[in-house]
Amino acid sequence: MRPDGRRPDQIRPIEIIPHFQKHAEGSALIKAGDTWVLCAVSVENSVPPFLAGKGQGWLTAEYAMLPRSTHTRTKRDPGGRGKEIQRLIGRSLRLAVDLKGLGERTLAVDCDVLQADGGTRTASITGAWVALALAVQKLVARGDLASADAVLRPPVAAVSVGVVDGEVVVDLPYVEDSRADVDLNVVMTADGKLIEVQGTAEREAFTRAQLDQMIDAAAAGIRQLNDAQRRAIG
């Protein structure tokens, strides 16, 4: 039995609250257990200089943890870890949209961790896709885009998976993540295609069979997250 009573293949209780911010074109608060992340997407009618005149859009992301989202106060500067995570979020979500269909617009994604208990990067990606979909829907509603289907690709979600005490477990809270033998983050589309796999042997090397088992566990967890995403956008 895991510390919070879940089965090895069971993700934490998931809640996604859409339209959480009044002014953002798209926003959502995602709660994955005790990890809470506020995700917002802003639409800017311009693109970086390297894309000017090319008829396609861009997506960029920023990630930060509030100073008391953890047990001790952290600085507001995202640091190296935060910058690495925001690049991951950007890479993942750029594969969730057709940038040419977007036109010369930039989707600016902001992920702010309100409370952290492991899996902040994966919750950020999952929640940010909802905010992204809502922003695209708003562009359609005000006549800036012909249809959401021309821009949105299959949903993208992410989950952590690892080996703890010799067993593969999915969606690790901090108490498990801090002592895991293997730590893996998996980003995947709703049609089962991998976007990114970040894995490290923290204490023990792992086998190819264990890797396959972790990918399968992540895929099952992501299917549940995709269901929550679809419910959130209606």
Image (spheres, rainbow, N blue to C red):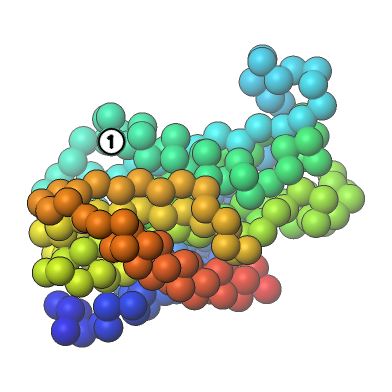
What is the secondary structure assignment of the residue under circle 1? helix
- Residue at 52 percent across and 72 percent down: it is 223
Residue 21 in sight from this viewpoint: no
- Residue at 55 percent across and 69 percent down: it is 226
Image-quadrant location for residue 134: bottom right
Residue type pointed to by label 1: Arg
Disc 1 marks which residue? Answer: 81
Q: Nearer the viewer, residue 37 or 7?
A: 7
Name the quadrant of the C terminus. Answer: bottom right
Q: Is residue 161 left or right of residue 164?
A: right
- Residue at 34 percent across and 79 percent down: it is 10
Q: Measured along the vertical axis of the image, is residue 77 above or below residue 29?
A: above
Q: Nearer the viewer, residue 52 or 100?
A: 100
Q: Measured along the vertical axis of the image, is residue 80 above or below residue 148?
A: above
Q: Nearer the viewer, residue 126 or 72?
A: 126
Image-quadrant location for residue 13: bottom left
Is the residue marked by circle 1 packed among few (<14), some (14-19), or many (20+) residues within 10 Å?
Answer: few
- Residue at 52 percent across and 39 percent down: it is 91
Residue 151 in sight from this viewpoint: yes
Q: Position of residue 145 (x, y in %)?
A: 84, 47
Q: Is residue 228 left or right of residue 97?
A: left
Q: Position of residue 44 (x, y in %)?
A: 67, 33
